[in-house]
Image (spheres, rainbow, N blue to C red):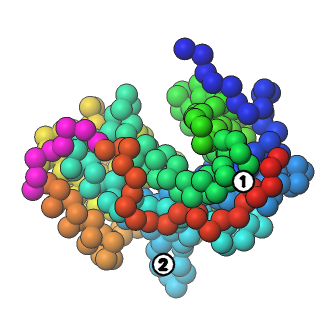
Amino acid sequence: MSALPTACPAPTPDLAAYDLLAPQLSGGKDSSVMLWSFMQDAAAAGVTDRVITYHATLGPLEWPAVHVDGTRYPSMSELAAAQSAACGIPPERHVEVARPAFLLTEIAAYGRFPRMGSPYCRKYAKESILSSAWTPLVRRLRRELGRPVRILKVMGLRADESRDRADHPAYRNVLTNSARVVDEWLPVKDWPTAAVLEWHQHAPVPHHWTYDSYPGADDWRGTSRCSCSLCVFASKRDLLLAIARRPRLAALYAEVESARGDSFRPDWRITDLITASRQPTAPDPGIVLPDDGPDMDLLEQQVRRALQKPPRKAVDLAARPPSGPTCGGCTAGTAAP
C-alpha cells in the first residue's frame, strides 16, 4: 500500500504550507540541534508565529534535575523548555503534555514490556498524547479554514542512532483524515553524531548531565541517549549506567518483571542487569540518585496498585487522557497559508 501524499510534493516541506509547525522536544542533544536548525528555516519562511513546541514528559521515568557541589543541573523537561526559549519561542508557545498514569504503570497493568516489534510505549506516552494536545487547535482552525488543518510534526531523529532510524523517511505523511493532515519531518536526520557534539560546544543551552560521566564533567562519557531512563531499546552500557544511577527505579522495574513474568528484554532480564551493574567491570555511574521525591512515591504507588490486578489483554492506546495540559489557548496558524 503506497504512502499518502504529504502536503508538499517535494523532498522537504514548504513550511508556509502548514497551519501549525510542531517541533517535538525531548530535552536531549538531538532535539536541541533540531530546533535550532528548524527555526532558521521557519524564520527564512516568515512563519515563526506558527511554531508551538511540545514536550511529552515521562515524569519520574525521565532523567531528573540534580544538585551537585552547589550547582543545579536541570531535568529533561526543564531543558526542553529552555531549548524552546533559546530559539525565541515565547513560553506560552511551549506546551508540556503528560498521561495521568506513568508509562511504567501502564506496563505493569498490561503485563508486558515494549518490544522492537511492538513499541507501544511510543504511542502511549508520546504520539497519542501529543495528538490529543492538538485537538482544540484543530477544531478551531478547521472551522476557520474550512478544510483539514495541516500540521508539520518536526522531530530530531537521526540516521546515526540506529538502523531503524536510518531507514526512516526524512519527510512523510503520518495521518490524513477530514480534520487534519499530519506530516513528519526530520531536518537533522543526516547530521552525524560528531557534528551534533561539535554544535553543542557553543549551544545556547547546555546538554543534559546524564550524557556526562558526572554532572558538569562535559565529557560525553555518560549515557549515549537521553530518553526514558530505563529504555528497553537502550544499549547495554546505557542500561548499566542508568541502573547504577537510579537503583530505586531499577528495583521497581524488577518488581514488575517478577510479578508479571515478562522479561525486561528478550535477551536481558532487569534482575540480571542489576547484578551486572554492581560488578567491578560495570561503568562507573559517577552519581547515584536518591529518587526520593513525590513523583517517585506516586509512581511506586501506581505500579503496585496495577500489579494487584490481573494484566489487561491490550493497551488502551486510543483512549484520550481524561486530564492534562493541552494547547487550547494557542493562537498559531490563525491565517491560512
Quarter where residue 94 is shown: bottom right
The amino acid type, in three-letter code, at marker 2 is Val
- Magenta span: chief secondary structure: loop
Q: At x 80% / y 49%, what residue is drawn?
A: 336
Q: At x 19% / y 38%, what residue is drawn?
A: 313
Left or right: 109 as drawn, with respect to 281? left
Instruction: Between residue 267 and residue 115, name the one nearer to us.
Output: 115
| Residue 160 is a magenta residue | no
Q: Which residue is mark 1?
A: 144
Q: At x 21% / y 50%, what residue is drawn?
A: 108
The amino acid type, in three-letter code, at marker 1 is Glu
> For the magenta stretch, what is the residue range?
308-315
Within 10 Å of disc 2 (Cα), the crowding (few <14, some 14-19, many 20+) is few
Instruction: Between residue 233 and residue 181, name the one nearer to us.
Output: 181
| Residue 311 is a magenta residue | yes
> At which x and y percent is residue 141?
68, 53
Cα–Cα span, label 2 and label 1: 51 Å
